[in-house]
Image (spheres, rainbow, N blue to C red):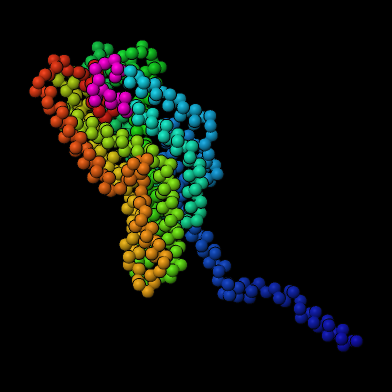
Amino acid sequence: MTVAKETFSVNVVQIDPKQIMKPKNYKRKIPFLIPSKTNKVDVSELKQNKAPATFQKSLRVTLIIGQIFSLLPVEGVCSTSPIDVRFVWWSFKFTYLILSLIGQFFITFMCFYRIFHSTSSLNGTTPFIFYGTTCITTTLFLRVALRWPDLIRHIAHVEDQDTYYDRTLTLKCNATCAGVLFLALVEHLLSLLSAYTGAMVCQSDMTHESFVKHFYPWVFNYLPYSFGLGILTQFLHFQSTFIWNFSDLFVICISYYLTSRLNYVNKQLLNAQGKYLPEVFWRTVREEYCRATQLVRRVDDVINGVIFISFANNLFFICLQLFNSLEDGIKGNGECNSRGKGKPSILGGYEAASYFFFSLVFLIARSVTVSLIASQVNSASNVPASVLYDVPSPVYCVEVQRFLDQVNGDNIALSGLQFFSVTRGLLLTVAGTIVTYELVMFQFSSQPQSSNISSTSPTLSFYNNTIIPIL
């Protein structure tokens, strides 16, 4: 019994837990046996240096500026969580949009009223078309706002499945936003300068009343002047000019995002071009491509109305501007012109001509930019075809054939209410339409010039990218 007790006591000493816990040796062996522990630390450190490219982050600045001018009245545009994005009826943003829409309808009605109480022409109907398209654009953005929360959640779900990184996406959106809005502001200031110098010539005393009566005859020829109505009319005019530019900016920024997602898939395919890869790789990339193309269709279903009104508005004003410039020039030889009349002016009497030339160039450049950037979505969707044709025969499989059929069979592109798809060929089609329009208008306008020429010539007012005769 004594020996047994001693043996038992020896065993207890051997299994002492303090002898097992050896921090130095244990910590030295574990990282060698399980290297995944150090790898996890390295991955977390890398992810802190670059954040995923998300839709909400990329368009945050653009949407905030749009809401300043009553567009897209949704809550949570500054949040990074899709749950916070929601549309609230009778919120401050929605009320602001409704009040702005009422003001735009008021200006549109006054332009329509003027058409029926004066001798109207193509130029005379331009203010009605301009403010009318502004009302339609604001209404379409309200339609977009109603469907925006569901779209954001769908995009967030796709981003969770296919996380990707693009450091230049947010920078491109913000830089484009700053550039377009700056040029739009310069254009608006030139229009005010042109109207101000014209009012100084036509009016005996230069006051706020004489300025707004000269610049907005469709309102103050039929309503009595008041300071509040003058300020409201100027604000609505500035808001309409911004809305016109913002619709193009909105399409550009969304095209940046969709093109970036498709290019992320294309980079994986281009890296695998000509390589012997298993079938699981082609299935994974094909499914990722499917999610990207479905996202393009989902976005297009929400914003195709904005795309349609943007292209239609740009096409009309380009045709009108080119016709006016080719027929009458851009010299601004109207009655209200300070050049040659001894009136002081900043640009020596060329304020109207400078505004018209800058506005025409800016309008054409902006329209071409929208067409080219929006067409990149279609161009990026066709890139996988060239890679799939180069798959080696030993690894050619059903997944590659399905992928190739999908790329060649689907037409992935943004559209204008499904009436047209924004591709590179659309730009040439629009250019041909403009040339045809100009030739037809010249044929019609050249006939009455040889017969009767009216003895009275209307005063020319350079208003918002067009020459408007003030009768």
Identify which residue, 313 or 37, lies in the foreground. Answer: 313
Query: Was residue 126 drawn as part of the magenta stretch in this picture?
Result: yes
As drawn, the residue found furthest toward the bottom would be 3
Kindly identify the residue that appears in the image at 52 percent across and 36 percent down. Answer: 87
Q: Is residue 51 above or below residue 16?
A: above
Task: Residue 96: give x, y in percent of width and height.
Answer: 47, 28
From the viewer's perspective, is 321 left or right of 414? left
Task: Residue 326: give x, y in percent of width and height.
Answer: 16, 32
Which quarter of the figure has residue 387?
A: bottom left
From the viewer's perspective, is 167 left or right of 130? right
Kindly identify the residue that appears in the image at 49 percent across and 30 percent down. Answer: 94
Kindly identify the residue that appears in the image at 16 percent across and 35 percent down. Answer: 439
* Quadrant location of the N terminus in the rendered image: bottom right
Task: Residue 127: give x, y in percent of width and height.
Answer: 30, 25
Kindly identify the residue that appears in the image at 71 percent across and 76 percent down. Answer: 20
Q: Is residue 338 visible?
A: no
Q: Is residue 50 above or below residue 77?
A: below
Identify which residue, 465 or 36, lies in the foreground. Answer: 465
Please provide the residue range marked out in magenta: 114-130
Query: Was residue 112 drawn as part of the magenta stretch in this picture?
Result: no
From the viewer's perspective, is 257 left or right of 426? right
Which quarter of the figure has residue 35?
A: bottom right
Identify which residue, 251 or 353, lies in the foreground. Answer: 251
* Quadrant location of the C terminus in the rendered image: top left
Which quarter of the figure has residue 336?
A: top left
Identify which residue, 193 or 454, lies in the foreground. Answer: 454
Q: How many marks?
A: 0
